[in-house]
Image (spheres, grey):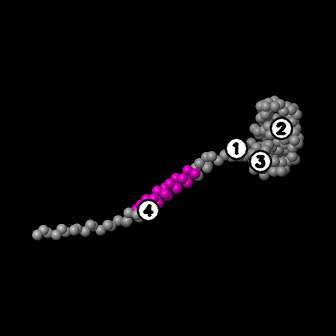
Amino acid sequence: MAAAPVWAQPPAKTGPPGWLVTLGVAAVLGAVLYGAYSYMGRHDAGSSAPDARTTARSPLETPPSETGAAPPSPAGAQMAKHVEITGIRITEDKKRAMLTVAVVNHSGADLAAMNGKIRVTTKDGAKTVATVDFKMANLAPYETKDYSIQILTTMRAYEMPDWQFLKAELSLK
């Protein structure tokens, strides 16, 4: 007689079920992909956003209602978009404060007989340092000229803010 086969019981499983492991791996992989996507999305948004130099308005683009200046005439407004006041220097000559700026013509046209006012303020616009009348005979195409004028003030030049804390606004008549 043949002996009856003995069936051995497989050992009992001690780990988690297979479906639970699959679900856990999918959750971890999803979290890693979401984190990478979020990081890359935040990183790309920061690099593609325009920086302060390209978004800041130049003083010539600031509406008169914000600066408190009278609105320029139509002819002055047309010229003003091509003229920039830069390179602000406040110096002293014989105990009188002098304002020196560089006036830049960004257009291809000759700009003649410009009159108006230059208003020098702190960069935050909280304090007006000087307001002077501006008169220039002409400015050739793409030309830069230095313009100097005495500032009527009781402050000495060394008491005024440094150039990097100042901005100039031009309003043409």
Q: Residue furthest front?
A: 1
- State the image coordinates of residue 38 (x, y, percent, origin top left): 55, 54
Q: Distance between the residues labelled 1 and 4?
A: 49 Å
Three-letter code for the amino acid on which mark 1 is drawn: Thr
Three-letter code for the amino acid on which mark 3 is drawn: Thr
Mark 4 or 2: in front is 4
Give the image quarter of residue 103.
top right
Residue at image mark 4? 23
User: Are the residues flagged by discs 2 and 1 in contact, CB closer than 8 Å?
Assistant: no
Residue at image mark 2? 79
Q: Which of marks 3 and 1 is nearer the N terminus?
A: 1
Q: How far apart are marks 4 and 3 (CA)?
A: 61 Å
Give the image quarter of residue 156.
top right
Three-letter code for the amino acid on which mark 2 is drawn: Met
Which SS does the magenta portion mostly show? helix
Mark 4 surroundings: few (<14), some (14-19) or many (≥20) residues within 10 A: few
Q: Distance between the residues labelled 3 and 2?
A: 24 Å
Residue at image mark 1? 54
- State the image coordinates of residue 92 (x, y, percent, origin top left): 80, 38
- Residue 155 falls within the magenta-colored stretch: no
Mark 1 or 4: in front is 4
**Residue at point 79%, 37% (across, down):** 82
| For residue 42, side relative to residue 71 (left or right) | left
**Residue at point 85%, 47% (across, down):** 69
- Residue 26 falls within the magenta-colored stretch: yes
Mark linked to residue 122: 3
- What stretch of residues is rendered in magenta? 21-41
Mark 1 surroundings: few (<14), some (14-19) or many (≥20) residues within 10 A: few
- State the image coordinates of residue 150 (x, y, percent, origin top left): 85, 39
Three-letter code for the amino acid on which mark 4 is drawn: Leu
